[in-house]
Image (cartoon, coloured by chain):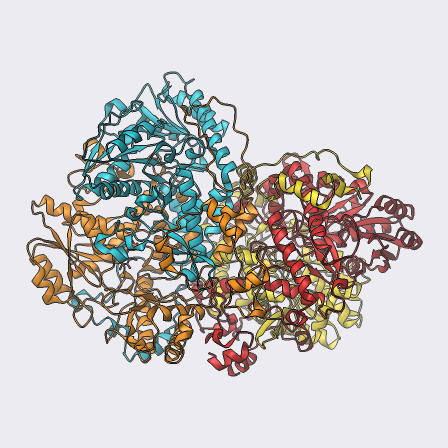
Chain colours: A red, B orange, C cyan, D yellow
Amino acid sequence: MTGWSQALTTHPAAATETATFTGNRGLQLEEKLLFEQDSPGHCGVDLPEPPPHRSRLGGLERQRPIGLPGLSEPQVVRHFTRLSQKNYAIDSGFYPLGSCTMKHNPRLNEKLARLPGFADLHPLQPQSTTQGALELIDTLAHWLRTLTGMPAMALSPAAGAHGELCGMMAIRAALTARGDPRQRILVPESAHGTNPATAATCGYAIEPIPNNPRGRVDLGALKAKLAPDVAALMLTNPNTCGLFEDEILEIAEAVHAAGAFFYCDGANFNAIVGRVRPADLGIDALHLNLHKTFSTPHGGGGPGSGPVALAASLAPHAPLPWIVHGEGGRALIEHAAKGPEGGPATNSIGRLKGFHGQIGMFVRALAYMMSHGADGLRQVAEDAVLNANYLRVRLQGALSLSYPGTCMHEVLFDDRFLKDTGVTTLDFAKAMIDEGFHPMTMYFPLVVHGALLIEPTETESKAALDQFADTVNALAARTKTDAAGFHAAPRLTPRRRLDETAAARKPVLRWQPELSKQEAAE
Amino acid sequence: MTGWSQALTTHPAAATETATFTGNRGLQLEEKLLFEQDSPGHCGVDLPEPPPHRSRLGGLERQRPIGLPGLSEPQVVRHFTRLSQKNYAIDSGFYPLGSCTMKHNPRLNEKLARLPGFADLHPLQPQSTTQGALELIDTLAHWLRTLTGMPAMALSPAAGAHGELCGMMAIRAALTARGDPRQRILVPESAHGTNPATAATCGYAIEPIPNNPRGRVDLGALKAKLAPDVAALMLTNPNTCGLFEDEILEIAEAVHAAGAFFYCDGANFNAIVGRVRPADLGIDALHLNLHKTFSTPHGGGGPGSGPVALAASLAPHAPLPWIVHGEGGRALIEHAAKGPEGGPATNSIGRLKGFHGQIGMFVRALAYMMSHGADGLRQVAEDAVLNANYLRVRLQGALSLSYPGTCMHEVLFDDRFLKDTGVTTLDFAKAMIDEGFHPMTMYFPLVVHGALLIEPTETESKAALDQFADTVNALAARTKTDAAGFHAAPRLTPRRRLDETAAARKPVLRWQPELSKQEAAE
Amino acid sequence: MRYLPLTPGDRRQMLAAIGVGSIDDLFSDVPKSARLDGLVDLPLAQGELAVERALSQMAAKNVAAGSAPFFIGGGVYRHHVPAAVDHLIQRGEFLTSYTPYQPELAQGTLQSLFEFQTQVALLTGMEVANASLYDGATACAEAVAMAHRVTRRGKAVLSGALHPHYREVCQTYAQFSGLQVEALKPTPGVADPIDLDNETACVVVQYPDFFGELRDCSALAARCHQAGALLVVVVTEIVSLGAVKSPGEMGADIVAGEGQALGNALNFGGPHLGLFAAREQHVRQMPGRLAGQTVDADGRRGWVLTLSAREQHIRRERATSNICTNSGLCALAFTIHLALLGEAGLTRLAELNHATACNLADRLETVPGVSVLNRSYFNEFTVRLPKPAAPIVDELAEFGVLGGVPLSRFYPGRDDLANLLLVAATETATEDDIEQFAHALAEVLR
Amino acid sequence: MRYLPLTPGDRRQMLAAIGVGSIDDLFSDVPKSARLDGLVDLPLAQGELAVERALSQMAAKNVAAGSAPFFIGGGVYRHHVPAAVDHLIQRGEFLTSYTPYQPELAQGTLQSLFEFQTQVALLTGMEVANASLYDGATACAEAVAMAHRVTRRGKAVLSGALHPHYREVCQTYAQFSGLQVEALKPTPGVADPIDLDNETACVVVQYPDFFGELRDCSALAARCHQAGALLVVVVTEIVSLGAVKSPGEMGADIVAGEGQALGNALNFGGPHLGLFAAREQHVRQMPGRLAGQTVDADGRRGWVLTLSAREQHIRRERATSNICTNSGLCALAFTIHLALLGEAGLTRLAELNHATACNLADRLETVPGVSVLNRSYFNEFTVRLPKPAAPIVDELAEFGVLGGVPLSRFYPGRDDLANLLLVAATETATEDDIEQFAHALAEVLR
Ligand SMILES: Cc1ncc(COP(=O)(O)O)c(C=O)c1O
Ligand SMILES: Cc1ncc(COP(=O)(O)O)c(C=O)c1O
C-alpha cells in the first residue's frame, strides 16, 4: 500500500492535486500480478472428491508444491477484466497498423466457432462422426481456390510464417524431386522478416534484391541475380510499401525462365481479393493470412491460420493430411502412400502441425466469406484501397510520402517531415496514443527511413478517417514547436513510455517470489 | 472536430501539456450519440428481399421516415464498446453500494440462461413442450420455500417493488375477504422508498414509525400506533441501517395481536440466508430480490426478479399463474376458478405481469443456489456479515458510526465526521471515485444525517477490504486539510462532476436534430 | 467455494480484528428461537460441471422454438437477434453495474439510456419516453394509472382487443386504487363500441390489436380529446412500427409497449421490456426513470438520471410509481439491435415480416376449412378452424410444428372463440416452415 | 454490407478528393490481363440468419464429444473449462487487439503473457518459458532445432514413444535443415534403447509417453548431460503435471508441450497451444516471443516484449525461428483456467483424472479378452483387444460411444499394433459413461 507522497513521486506526471492514494485514476485501475494475490489453498474451481482408487503413477508422484497462487473466481474475473481495460483494440478505436490488416471481427463468427459440432469435436474421432467438419474444410478450400485461381490448397499451416514454410518446403521438395537442388532464394529488402527467416529454415541462403525508386522490385537487378542456383523468388504483392508490383508478369516470366519458382507472400491479399487472382500473376505458391484478410481475430498475437495455395507443379508436395471424396463421404488421408512408418512420403513434405489445421479459424473465415459473398469480397478490396488512398491525399501535405502515386491497401510515409524537429517516428507514434489512436506500423519496411506504414482497412468509416487525418496533421504541425511534448508522450496511458532497453539488458521473464518481496518492500 | 484551444477551454482540468486535439485521453475515448453518426440509408443488418406479396396493412402504411440513424456493424460495436468503457462495474472493482448487494455475477449463470431450451422458449407453447421450464420454476420455488420456511411462493413479480405490490395486495385481498377493510400501513422512517410507494399504490395511507436510538423500530411507538384500522406493518429486516430487528418476535406478536399482517421487505436477505428462516420470525409475506441475494446481474438497472413468500393465510390470494402437478406432468394454471373472462378471480389478486415471471433470472438464481448449496449459502451470509463488521471496525475510527455494536451485512455511517470540514457526504463520495472505488450508498437511509451506507458483500477478499479501508481512512484525514480538493472531485473520470440541478431545471430527455446541429456549430 | 474469496485464515484474522470469538457472535441479535444451527434441507455445494449437467438436462426437456417450424406470437415475437447484441450486453461494464446513481461512473449506461429514450420516442411518434418498465402489461397498467393522475377521472375503458394479459394486469393494479376499469367484450374482427363520459380518464386500445387487426385510431383520439380523456395506445409487436403509422401520428397521448421483439429472446415470458412514451406536457406524471442531458464541471456534455422528484426514493408515498429496478439490460439490447437496423433495416425487417405473414395466410387458406378472419394485419392474424383449436395445436406439436395459440387459452369461458387460432410469422420462418405447417394442419384436420 | 461503413456517397466524395474518376483507376497498377471485371464464381453476400443456418447445419453433421460417452485423447484432452474463461477471452480488448508492439496500449496482454510464462515455467519445473508457439508438435520441432543451435551437433534421437505426429513434424522441419533425425521404433510398454554419441544434439522423450506410460527420465538426463546432449521432454497432457514430478525436476533441458488441455476446446485439432520452456542459460537461443518486466518513464513497473533480437523481424534470416503470430488467445485461456484452478485446484483436477482413468481401466479389464498394457499411467493408457481395434472403434461409434483411438490410425504399417487401443478418461467422464463404454465394448467383442 503506497502513501500520498509516494503516489506523488511515482507519478510526477500527475499534478499534485490529482495524485491518488491508491494509484488508481478513476476508471484506470492498477492491478497486481496473480502471484501477488495468492491466498494459499484457495481455489476458483469446485471439483468433487476423487473416487477411491489405487494409484498407478509408477512412483512418480509429485513431492513438491508447484507454486501456483490460489484465487477465487471473483478475484480472477476482476483481475483479467482490469487487465483487458489496459488494452487498446479494434473494438475501441482506429488501429491502422500497416501490414496487419486490423479489420472488424464479426461476433457472428465467434458464435459459430463455438458450436459444439465444431468446438467440441476431437481430431481423432472416427471419421464417420466428423463429416461436417471435413465438409467445412473442403468448403473453405473451395472458396480459397476460387479466390486465388490456384488448383490446390494446403490448409494445415497455423499462421503466415508457417504457410511460408509450407510453400518453400514444397518448392524445395519439387526441386529435389527434379534432381536440381538449388541454394539461393531472392528476397526483396522490403520483405517481412518472416520471409528470409523461413527461407533459412529450409536451408537456403538469402540474396537480397533492391527496390527501384518507385518502391517496387528492381527488375534489372532481379534478372541479374537470377542465376541457375536460385531456387525461388519470395515476393510480397501488394508489397510492404503498399504498392502493387506492376511488373509482376515480367518478374514471373524471368523467374520461370531461370527454372526457379515464384513464391508470393499473400499477407496483403486484402487489397486485391475478388479483383485479382494470384494465379493470373504467374505465382507458384502463396500463403494467405486468414487472421488478416478473412478477419479471424488477432487475439493479442494469435492464433492465426495460413493456408497455402499451390500451383499444379507443387501440389504433389502438399503437406499431410489431405481430404479425398470416397464412397462413404469425405475421408481424411493422414499417411502418404510410401511413407516409412507414417513418416513423410517421398512426395509430400510430410506433416507440418499436430493435427488437421486451425479448424476454429476456418469456421470464422468461412462465415466471414459467406457473409460477404463474391460481391462483398470485391467491395472489401475496393474500400480498403479507397480508404488508404483517401488517407494518402489527406496526409501527404503534412507527412512525407515515400513513393508518389496511387497506393493499394496501405500507404507508406517516412520521417523526412520530422527532419530538424528533434522528434522521431517513435515519438510521433507515442503522441498519437495520447490522442486515442493506435499508431501505424513504425520502422517497417526497412527500405525507407523511420517508416510510418498506415493501413486503415475497409471497416473504417469516412468520419473515422477524417478525425484521424485531422489529428495527424495537427500533430505534424505541432512537431515544429513542441519536441519536448513528443518526447514525454504518452502521458495519458496506464503506463507512460516503457523502457525497452532496460528490459533487454537484464531480462526479467517471469515472476519470482524473491523479486516480488523486494518490490513490496520498496 | 475541436481544435487545441477548445480542447483546452473545455478541459481546464487537464494541464496544458496534457490537452489533446481529439479530446480523447489515451484509452479514455470520447463517443458521440448514435444519432450524430448517421450515414443515411446505411444498415448494420443484412436482410433478404421480402418475397412478393399483396400488402394487408389496411391503408396504414407509414408515410414519414422514423428518423433512426444508419450505422454499419463495426461502428455500432465500437460505439457500445466505448460506452461500456465509461462504466464502473463489479467486474472492475469494489462496489460497496449499501442496500444493493453488489456481489460477483458468475458467468456460468449467463451461459445457462442462454441455453436454447430456456432462452428460445415461448411462454405460449403447448405445455407438453415446456415441461423442463415448469420443472425449473418448481425447483426454484422449492429452494426458496426451504430457505424462507414459508409454505407458498409467488414467482411472477419482476422486481422487489413488484414483489412488495404482490404481497401488499395479497394482504389487502385477505382483509377484504375477511370483511375487515383497514386503511393504514405502518412503515418505519428508515424504509426504502418503494415501501411507502407500494402501500400507496394499494390505496393505503402510510403511517411512519420512528427508530429507537439503537437504530431499530421503536416497539413502544409501534404498539401505540397499532390501531384496529392498521392493515399491516412493512418492516425491512435486516433493516436499512444494516441492523437486525432484535425485537422482531415481539413486533410480530403485537402486529398479529392487532389483527394486522406483517410484511417484511427481504431485500437484505443476504445477511441471513441459510442461518435464519423468515417464517421463524412471524412474517406473513416477504419478497426476495433474486438480483441481490441470488446474484442475477443488475445490468445497469435491471431486469430483476422479486419472488414473494406467503404465509398460509395469504397463499390463497397469490397471483396467477400457478403450477400444479397433474397426470401428464406439471401444468400451468393461468385462470383462477371463478374469474370472469379470465379476469382476477375472487381469491387470487390476479395477474401481475404479462407472462409467467422472469424465467431468465430464475435460471441464473437456481444455478447460483445449486452452486453454493445449503452449506455455501449459509457461508454467504456469514462472510457477508463478517466483511461488513470488519469494515465497521476498520473505519469507525475515522468515520462516524451511526449505531454502535455489531451490524449485519452492511454498516451505516453518518456525516458527523465531516462537521466543520466544508466537505459533504457527496464530496466524499466523489473523491472515492478518483481513487478507483464505487462510492457507498449516499444519503440513505434518511434516519441519519448525510448517510454513508457500506455493503461489501461476501464476494470481496480481505485484501480488497483492506485497500478500501486504508483509502477511506486516508481520505477522511484529508477532509481536514483539503476541502477544495473534495469539491473539485472527481477529476479523473471521463466526465467531471455532473450538474444534476441543471438537468432537472430544463430537462433534455432525448436527442433532437436541432439540438445536435447547435452543438456541432459550437 | 469458488465464489467466496475469504479463506479460513482470513476469517480467523477478521474475527480477531472485530474482537469476537466466533461468527455466531455476529448473529447474536437474532432471537435464539430463530437461529438455525444446522443446514437447511437442500443439496450441498456443487461444481460447474454438475450444475451445468443438471440444468442442461432440464433445458433439454423443452422444445426450443428454433428447433421446429414456429408460428407463435400473442405478445412475444421471435426475431433473429444479431450476435453483436448479446456479445455487447454481456460486457461486464454493462452487465455487472448498478442503476447509474453515480453518473461520473456510469456515462456508458446513461448515454445508452438517453439513446434508448430517443429511439422509443421516434418509433412511437411521441415526444418523450422513459428508461423502461418491467414489461408491456405493467406499462399498460402504469399508463392507466397515469391517465388517472393527469385527468383526475375515475374510469378507464379497455378495448376488447387489448391483450387479455394486459387487461388482467390493469384490473389487478386498479382493484384497490379506486379506479374503475371497464373492459369491453373481446370480439375478434369487430371494432369496440366505445362510449366516453366525463368520468373517463382514458381509453386503451392495442395496435396492431390482439387479434392482429390494424385499426386507425385517429378518430378515436379526437373523440377522447373532445371528451377530455387520454388515448392510450398499446403496441405489443414494436417491429410493426417499421411498417405502419405511429401511434403518435394518430393522436395517442400515451404509448405503452412491449420491446422484447427487438434485441431480446423469448425467455419463456421474461425478462421482457416495458416501453413507455408520452407527450412532453405530462412528463412530470410519468412513471419510471429518465436519463437527461447536462454538463460537467468543465462544461462538457454528459448524462444523469433526472426528474427523480417523481420517483419513490424521493417522493415516497406520493411517487408516480413504486418502480425501482426496471429492465435496463433489455433496453440496452433493444437499443443495440435497433442501432444495427437503423431506418433502412427496420423498414426492411418490417416489410419482410409482413410479406412472410401474408404468404403464410394465403397458404393456410388453401387448407380445407381454414379461413383468415382479419381484414388487415402486420405479422400476426387470427384463423378460424373447423374444429376447436386447442387440441389441434397439441396435435401439431406432435407433428413437430409449433403452430400458433388457441384463443381458448386466453378466453376459456368463450365457446364462440374455441375454433379460433392466433398465428404469427416473422423473418425467421422459412418457406419450408410454412409448407410443413400447412401440411401438418391439413393432416390433423382430416 | 453490414460490415462496410462506407456509403455510396462516401465513396464518391473520397474518389473526388483523391482526384480519380473511378475505383478502377486505383487498380491501374494491376496488369490488364490480370484484372477481373466480373465477380468470382462464388455465392453472393448473405445475412447472419442465412450464414448461421448453413454453418449450423454443417456442425450438426458432426457428433460433438459432449453428446456421447467420450474416451479419446492421443494428445488432445477434453476437460471442463469454467464459463468465466470463455467470457473473459471474448472481451474485445483481448480478442481484437494485435501483438503488443505498442506496450503502452497493451499492458493487459503483456501482463497476462508474463503470468503465462511464469505459470508454464512453474508447471514444467523450468527456469524460463516463452509466450507460446503454434502447438505441441511444432514446439517439439523447434526444441530439436534449438538443441541443434545450442550443441552445434547434427543428430536428434526421438523416442519411439513420442507422439507419432510430433515425430513426423520433427522430420518435416528437419528434412532440409541438415539435421539428422533418428526415430526409434515404437514399442508400447518397452523402454527405448537409446544410445548417445558425440554427434547427438538431443534426445526427445514424451512424459507421460504416447502410450500413457510414466517413465522417470532422471537417469536419461544424466546420460545426456554426460554425452553433451540436451534432454527434450515433451508433455502432451499438461494436466498430468498436477500429479507427477515435473520434467525440470528430472533434469530436462527443454520442455516442449501442448497446452490445449487447460482453457481450450478440442477444436477438431486447432487452434491449440504450443508450450516451450528451457533453462535460463539458453534463453537467447529460444524461439518465439518473450514478455519481460521493465519500468515506465515514471519508474512504475510495466511490461514489454523483449529479447526480440532473437526474432525474425529484427534478425531476419539469422533468427532463432520464423514464428511471428503465435497462439496468444489460447495462452490467455490457459492462464485464466490455471489462475482459477491454482495449486489446490490443479492438484485435485489431476487426482480426479487419474482416479477416473484407474476406474475405467479396472472396468475395461472385466471385459473378456481385454487387457491393459501399461504398468503406470496418468489419465490415458493402452489396452489390448482380442481383435483389430479400428473396426471395433467404428462399431462403438454406432453404439454411440466414442471409445478411444486405434493405434493403427497412427501406425498403418504395423500389424503387431493392430489390436491396440489408446483410451483416455478425464473428469468429464461419469461412472455411467464408463459403464456404457464397457457394455458396448463387451457387445461388439462378442
Ligand atoms: C507481409 C507479411 N508477411 C508475413 C507475415 C507473417 O504472418 P504471421 O504473423 O501470421 O506468421 C506478416 C504478418 O505479420 C506480414 O505482414
Ligand atoms: C431495502 C430495499 N427494498 C426494496 C428495494 C426495491 O427492489 P427493486 O429495485 O428490485 O424494485 C430495494 C432495492 O433498491 C431495497 O434496497
User: Is residue A241 depicted above or below C33 in this figure?
Assistant: above
User: Is residue D345 depicted above or below A166 in this figure?
Assistant: below
Identify which residue is drawn at 54% across, 82% down. A518
B337 sits to left or right of D404: left
User: Is residue D372 depicted above or below A134 in this figure?
Assistant: below
User: Number of callouts in the render?
Assistant: 0
Question: C1 or A7: which is nearer to us?
Answer: A7
A382 sits to left or right of B426: right
| Residue positioned most to the top | C368
Residue D123 visible in the current orientation: no
Image quarter for ligand 1: bottom right
Residue D113 visible in the current orientation: yes
- Examine the image and state in which quarter residue A147 appears: top right
Residue A11 % position (x, y): 54, 76
Question: B387 or B207: which is nearer to us?
Answer: B207
Q: Quadrant of the N terminus of chain B?
A: bottom right
Residue B135 % position (x, y): 32, 45
Residue B68 % position (x, y): 48, 41
Residue D246 % position (x, y): 59, 71
